Image: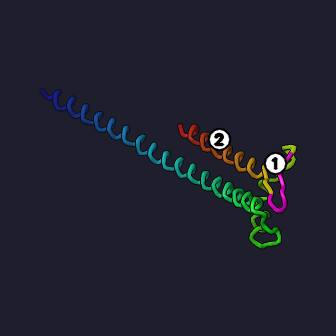
Amino acid sequence: MNNEPQDQRVVETREAETTTNSVEPVTNRVEKNRSVSKAIQVIWYIIGVIVALLLVRFVLALLGANLDNAFAEFIYVITDPLVAPFRGLLQVGQFQAGVVRVEIETLLAGLVYTLIGWGITAAVRLAKR
């Protein structure tokens, strides 16, 4: 009869250990998911800013903005390093009719940076597993 309470205590201790161990990984998983979600948000924010600047550049060129204007010059100076890798990639980099320019290189840059962002976020999601 004395063995019965002792066995019961061992079972209760093991159950307590099991519930404690199963809670820890869930907490770690939640924290890991939060940090991965935050990293993905930061990546998409950066890509969004880059693509938005490229879009402003494209619209300015399309509307024939005066490149001597401070705002237009600022946008072109900021986005020039982003568009530079794509210059000369295509036979026709831009079309021009009067003051209106269609910069295909800028559109291509926006597309490539979006795909890069998608690839990085996919890699981050895979790495969390």
Image coords of residue 7 (percent x, y): 21, 29
Q: Are marks 1 and 2 in contact (CB under 8 Å)?
A: no
Quadrant containing the N terminus in the rendered view: top left
Considering the numbered disc 2 on the image, is that residue within a helix, a strand or a loop? helix
Real-space Cα separation, disc 1 to disc 2, in angstroms: 19 Å
* Circle nearer the viewer, 1 or 2: 1
Residue 98 in magenta stretch: yes
Q: Which residues fall within the magenta stretch? A: 92-100
Residue 21 quadrant: top left
Image coords of residue 59 (percent x, y): 72, 59
Within 10 angstroms of label 1, few (less than 14), some, or many (20 or more) residues? Answer: some
Residue 20 quadrant: top left
Q: Is residue 105 left or right of residue 20?
A: right
Considering the numbered disc 1 on the image, is that residue within a helix, a strand or a loop? helix
Q: Residue at x 53, y 52 (%)?
A: 38
Mark seen at residue 24: none
**In front: 19, or 6?**
19
Q: Residue at x 49, y 45 (%)?
A: 33
Q: Amino acid at mark 2?
A: Gly
Q: Amino acid at mark 1?
A: Phe
**In front: 5, or 117?**
117
Mark seen at residue 86: 1
- Colour setting: rainbow
What residue would you read off at disc 2? 119
Image coords of residue 68 (percent x, y): 83, 71
Within 10 angstroms of label 2, few (less than 14), some, or many (20 or more) residues? Answer: few
Q: Earlier in the sequence, mark 1 or mark 2?
A: 1
